[in-house]
Image (cartoon, rainbow, N blue to C red):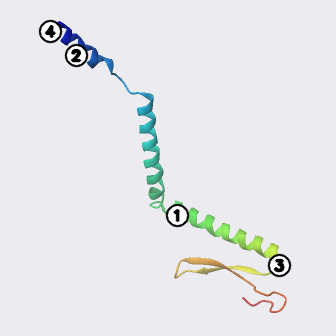
Amino acid sequence: MLTNQRRGNVNSQGRGGVTLLELVLVMIVLFVLAGVAAPRFSDFFPSLQVRKTADRILAWARKARCDAALTGSCHRLVFDPEGRRYWIEYEPRPLREPGTF
């Protein structure tokens, strides 16, 4: 009987704490969940939405400017407030029909 009690004692004390593998797996799960949840929380803050939209509009304006410099045609950024959209229009043939979009 004494040997059975000793075996039980050794097994119960043999495992204590957390292994490095378990810690890494928990950290990976937490980072994945945080990566999924963080963008959803940013939509709740209007200032972040305004900044994100302003950055997108500036990027489109820079693209229109670069395209105009490369092609030599006029480009303009068009806004549709009702549809909440914006796009770039360009002058298809600047030498034959200048100013037509």
N-terminal label among 2 and 1: 2
81 over 43 or under it: above or below:
below
Q: SS of the residue at dot 2?
A: helix
Instruction: Locate residue 88, reporting x and y percent.
Output: 67, 78
Q: Which residue lies furthest to the top in this view?
A: 2
Q: Is residue 49 left or right of residue 44?
A: right
Front: mark 2 or 1: 2
N-terminal label among 1 and 4: 4
Which quadrant of the figure has residue 5? top left
Residue pointed to by mark 4: 1
Label 2 neighbourhood size at 10 Å, few (<14), some (14-19), many (20+)?
few
Q: Is residue 23 left or right of residue 58?
A: left
Q: Distance between the residues labelled 3 and 2?
A: 84 Å
Marks 4/2 in contact by CB < 8 Å: the verdict is: no
Residue pointed to by mark 2: 8
Residue pointed to by mark 3: 72
Q: Which of 46 and 41 is in front in this view?
A: 41
> Disc 2 marks which amino acid?
Gly
Label 3 neighbourhood size at 10 Å, few (<14), some (14-19), many (20+)?
few
N-terminal label among 4 and 3: 4
Disc marking residue 49: 1
3 over 92 or under it: above or below:
above
Q: How far apart are marks 4 and 2 (CA)?
A: 11 Å
Q: Which image quarter is the N terminus in?
A: top left
Front: mark 4 or 3: 4
Q: Distance between the residues labelled 2 and 1?
A: 60 Å
Q: Distance between the residues labelled 1 and 4?
A: 71 Å
